Image (cartoon, rainbow, N blue to C red):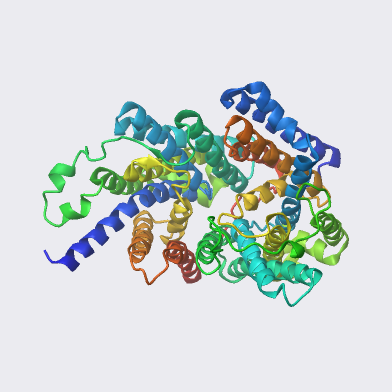
């Protein structure tokens, strides 16, 4: 293989890997968005999932138990959101903001208490022990693309497929969409919009938790600013994808492309790395504007 | 908001404050090695000396100024989440100006120009989000957050590059000469005359929002957009203005930090101030006068957290937990209706 082809494949691999956390979080957020709740706490939920997931994985040395902990912790936090908005009628945006703050505080305090540092917590987790990595990486081309943390990447795409099915073809998905477009009608039919909001928020907790955990696993560590805006980018992916699952997934790929470009461009000394770091946000902002304008 | 009595609002705020104090105690009980000394560090130490007390009061200045901006924007249901970047950019612009013009002007001219440029830069950034909302229906929350993330990276780039102080081991701009810093009024602490300015702004915005036509129309826009349009109020203009004022006050508070307690812009300058100002505005429940006690309260939580970190090793991030709790406790009835989607 010649060198530029290898570089290209490397770039594609990185893009696919970068899309993984975004896919989890944005498809999760899509559920709450469809139910009519703009969930700005994806960022915080991802951080919670990353921290508790990595902590559990480090403790048990088992990445599946880590995933379970990520799901549980982030869904608990999203249930807190649901509880506050339904029972205490708090404003969803302020609640989301509070969850983001809470996530920052809790992860720092527990990191200090458990690992005696609030900087980088490195875990000794065997990230190569994946389910499919050995078999799939044998396949030509596809194997090369997926050989980065293959299992989570595949799970992320399965998550997209399953969620799309739930949203489009199940009664549960229909109720969520109906609550978003007409809550009065839903409650007239005898369903509680609050309950459906809660279920949708739990979906967003599951997705964000797994997304954060995938991010933690990718570096086998937890660092305070590990999410660094990806929750917000995932939120914009929902808009750019016009709230349709596969288009949301495509938007995630676009943003992942921006992220890997920014990573790639940092290698060039001519372009200042810190300036390049702004690129994903810039692409996100521009696409948010374009998505709204076309509507 | 207005149909509740003032006393019941005050009661709710007090309850929220009390609950977050109880939570603070619980967190310390769980995580501090020595609970008793941690309690003392959190609750007493900020008041225990002129130095600590003055610094505590100095910390309220940016919270008051930025909190006023958030509060004004709330009035028209605009939610500015870009405070971190606006404050950072305002501070950086102020520092550059102060470092370059200090020889040509006297101190007081420098202060006025720096405050002006900081406010101007912040207002420009806020205006972008306001315009995006007014003409493209882009959520001002998300656009202001993303803009802020972009600006933080650009500011970091300048601080670690072009503006880096070569003599310093830190990632920081050069120090502004001390004769161009605002006069300190409570030695040995960092409290300076900007506190008087902050108090003046409280009165100014109280009068603006309660007694002026502008304040009234801003509120009408927030309460009922349809009705505002029916009355011939330009909702668009007020949305843009609200974001501009909010961004401007963030930028101003950054600039005042540069020519006040900080004297330079280090990387990571804003350090959560942008978010804390939102807590201040929420606790004030739409009253400009109440910005003062709520800034005192949030600054107290911050001072306490900082002291506990130094004394007992509990991370100062407990401030985030406490602020989040205070926000959750208080928001039960703030900004009713903002969360419900308008049908498109």
Q: Residue A278 location in percent, x, y? A: 46, 63
Name the side, left or right, on which A158 lies relative to A36: left
**Can the viewer see residue B218 in this picture?**
yes
Q: Quadrant of residue B264?
A: bottom right
Pick whichever, B24 or B76, lies toward us: B24
Identity of the residue drawn at 82% across and 61% down: B216
Q: How many marks?
A: 0
Pick whichever, B215 or B103, lies toward us: B103
The residue at the far front in this view is B167
Picture quarter with the N terminus of chain A: bottom left
The residue at the far bottom in this view is B104
Name the side, left or right, on which B165 lies relative to A74: right
Name the side, left or right, on which B327 lies relative to A23: right
Identity of the residue drawn at 69% across and 36% down: B304
Up-down relation of residue B32 to residue B48 (above or below): above
Up-down relation of residue B319 to residue B182 (above or below): above
Q: Residue A250 location in percent, x, y? A: 34, 59
Q: Residue A196 location in percent, x, y? A: 50, 39
Q: Quadrant of residue B258?
A: bottom right
Name the side, left or right, on which B265 lies relative to A133: right
Q: Residue A120 location in percent, x, y? A: 43, 41
Up-down relation of residue A17 to residue A86 (above or below): below
Up-down relation of residue B29 to residue A23 (above or below): above
Identity of the residue drawn at 77% across and 59% down: B219
**Can the viewer see residue A192 in this picture?**
no
Identity of the residue drawn at 11% across and 49% down: A138
């Amino acid at each position: 293989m010649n060198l530029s082809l290898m570089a290209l494949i490397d770039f594609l691999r990185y893009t696919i890997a970068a899309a993984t956390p975004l896919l989890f979080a944005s498809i999760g957020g899509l559920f709450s968005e469809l139910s009519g709740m703009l969930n700005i706490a994806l960022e915080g939920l991802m951080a919670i999932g990353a921290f508790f997931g990595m902590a559990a994985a480090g403790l048990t040395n088992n990445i599946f138990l880590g995933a379970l902990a990520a799901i549980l912790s982030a869904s608990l936090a999203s249930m807190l959101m649901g509880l506050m908005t339904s029972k205490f009628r708090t404003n969803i945006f302020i609640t989301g903001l509070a969850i983001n703050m809470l996530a920052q505080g809790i992860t720092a305090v527990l990191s200090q208490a458990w690992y005696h540092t609030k900087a980088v917590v490195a875990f000794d987790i065997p990230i190569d022990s994946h389910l499919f990595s050995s078999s799939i990486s044998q396949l030509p081309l596809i194997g090369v693309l997926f050989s980065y943390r293959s299992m989570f990447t595949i799970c992320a795409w399965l998550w997209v497929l399953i969620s799309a099915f739930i949203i489009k073809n199940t009664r549960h998905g229909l109720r969520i969409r109906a609550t978003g477009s007409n809550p009065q009608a839903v409650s007239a039919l005898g369903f509680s919009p609050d309950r459906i909001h809660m279920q949708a928020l739990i979906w967003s907790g599951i997705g964000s938790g797994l997304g954060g955990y995938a991010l933690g696993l990718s570096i086998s560590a937890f660092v305070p600013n590990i999410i660094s805006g990806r929750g917000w980018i995932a939120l914009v992916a929902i808009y750019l994808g016009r709230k349709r699952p596969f288009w949301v997934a495509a938007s995630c790929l676009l943003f992942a492309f921006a992220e890997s470009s920014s990573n790639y461009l940092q290698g060039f000394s001519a372009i200042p790395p810190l300036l390049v770091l702004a690129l994903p946000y810039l692409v996100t902002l521009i696409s948010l504007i374009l998505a709204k304008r076309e509507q | 908001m207005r149909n509740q009595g003032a006393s019941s609002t005050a009661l709710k705020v007090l309850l929220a404050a009390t609950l977050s104090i109880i939570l603070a105690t619980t967190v310390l009980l769980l995580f501090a090695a020595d609970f008793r000394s941690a309690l003392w560090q959190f609750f007493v130490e900020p008041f225990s000396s002129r130095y600590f007390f003055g610094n505590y009061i100095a910390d309220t200045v940016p919270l008051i100024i930025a909190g006023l901006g958030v509060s004004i924007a709330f009035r028209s249901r605009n939610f500015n989440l870009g405070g971190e970047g606006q404050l950072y950019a305002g501070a950086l612009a102020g520092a550059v100006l102060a470092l370059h013009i200090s020889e040509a002007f006297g101190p007081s001219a420098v202060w006025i120009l720096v405050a002006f440029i900081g406010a101007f830069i912040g207002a420009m950034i806020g205006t972008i989000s306001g315009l995006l909302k007014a003409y493209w229906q882009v959520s001002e929350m998300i656009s202001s957050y993303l803009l802020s993330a972009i600006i933080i990276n650009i500011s970091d780039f300048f601080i670690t590059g072009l503006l880096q102080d070569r003599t310093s081991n830190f990632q920081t701009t050069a120090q502004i000469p001390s004769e161009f810093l605002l006069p300190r009024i409570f030695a040995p602490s960092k409290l300076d005359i900007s506190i008087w300015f902050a108090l003046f702004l409280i009165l100014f915005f109280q009068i603006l929002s309660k007694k002026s036509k502008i304040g009234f129309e801003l509120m009408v826009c927030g309460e009922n957009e349809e009705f505002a349009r029916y009355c011939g109020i330009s909702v668009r203009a007020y949305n843009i203005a609200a974001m501009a004022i909010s961004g401007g006050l963030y930028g101003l508070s950054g600039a005042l930090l540069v020519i006040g307690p900080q004297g330079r812009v280090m990387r990571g300058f804003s350090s959560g101030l942008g978010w804390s100002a939102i807590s201040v505005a929420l606790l004030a429940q739409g009253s400009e006068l109440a910005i003062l006690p709520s800034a005192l309260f949030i600054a107290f939580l911050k001072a306490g957290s900082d002291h506990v970190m130094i004394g007992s090793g509990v991370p100062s991030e407990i401030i985030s937990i406490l602020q989040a709790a205070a926000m959750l406790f208080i928001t039960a009835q703030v900004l009713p209706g903002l969360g419900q989607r308008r049908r498109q």
